[in-house]
Image (cartoon, rainbow, N blue to C red):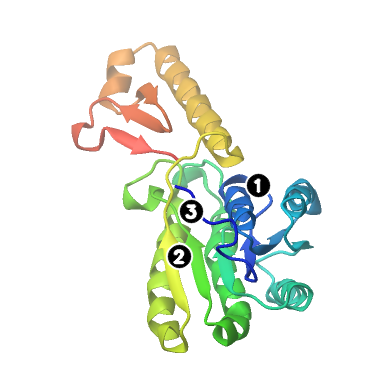
Amino acid sequence: MTFRSDLLKGKTALVTGGGTGICRGIALALADVGCNVAIASRKEEHLDPTVQELKQRGVGALAVAGDVRDPAAVERVVAKTAETLGGIDILINGAAGNFVCLAENLSPNGFGTVVDIDLKGTFNVSKAALPHLKARRGVVLNISATLQLLGTVGQSHAAAAKAGIDSLTRTLAAEWGPYGVRVNGLAPGPVDGTEGVRRLDHASRSRHDQRTVSARTNGDDRRGRERGAVSGVGRFGVHHRGRPRNRWRLCG
């Protein structure tokens, strides 16, 4: 699909997590149709290469370091974006953290960190940006996922956070609609080439190898299969024998 190169000329977007992955692609796509773009992340090194690409497209571009878990830092990111680029018309909430870990091995801090980044971060940035969005009758797009729609092995923390984002999106849409602010959600599945997909794919395969070796070392492969030991792995998933009702678990 091709859009006019000036479709969003004069508009400004703030994209959290915009230095890498899916949100980097979104930031560049916005710039391709004339939108000024600010990208935010905890680490400046994630932002610098992308902000240079944005500037090469001839739009206003800004990189702002800030942790979405910190409301004060979020306020600074939003204020600098509005001051430098003249306001905020579009907010893309894409900052996220994730790793593969079975719930039985997951620490409370690990669970909480992902919820803090994904869910609380989405709330923090949305609330901070609301005055600017109300003034411009703006748009919020929250980046969710598909892993919470099924029981996803090793993703209890991320699935819970993304389910929360889905619920938050619906609530904010109902509350902020009267202000003329549209709030929507986007739930992409695994996107080839992104850092997150490479990390999850590697972790899935490593876990598969470790559990398969463990089952065979015990000298009873049949008993391991009956107990649900991993016997094969698919793209972003783990295949469990002996569990016909839950055969494939997506991990992306």
Q: Residue at x 59, y 48 (%)?
A: 25
The residue beneath circle 3 is 157
* Mark with earlier residue (3, 1): 1
Q: Amino acid at mark 1?
A: Thr
Q: Residue at x 39, y 69 (%)?
A: 167
The residue beneath circle 2 is 165
* Mark with earlier residue (1, 2): 1
Q: Position of residue 199 (x, y in %)?
A: 58, 35
**Number of the label disc, if any, that sits on residue 48:** none
Q: Residue at x 38, y 11 (%)?
A: 219
Dot 1: few (<14), some (14–19), or many (≥20) neighbours within 10 Å? Answer: many
**Cα–Cα span, label 3 and label 1:** 21 Å
Q: Residue furthest left?
A: 245
Q: Position of residue 181 (x, y in %)?
A: 48, 80
Q: Residue at x 64, y 60 (%)?
A: 34
The residue beneath circle 1 is 20
Q: Amino acid at mark 3?
A: His
Quadrant assignment for the C terminus: top left
Tell me the element at label 1.
Answer: loop
- Please, is residue 28 above or below residue 130 in the view? above
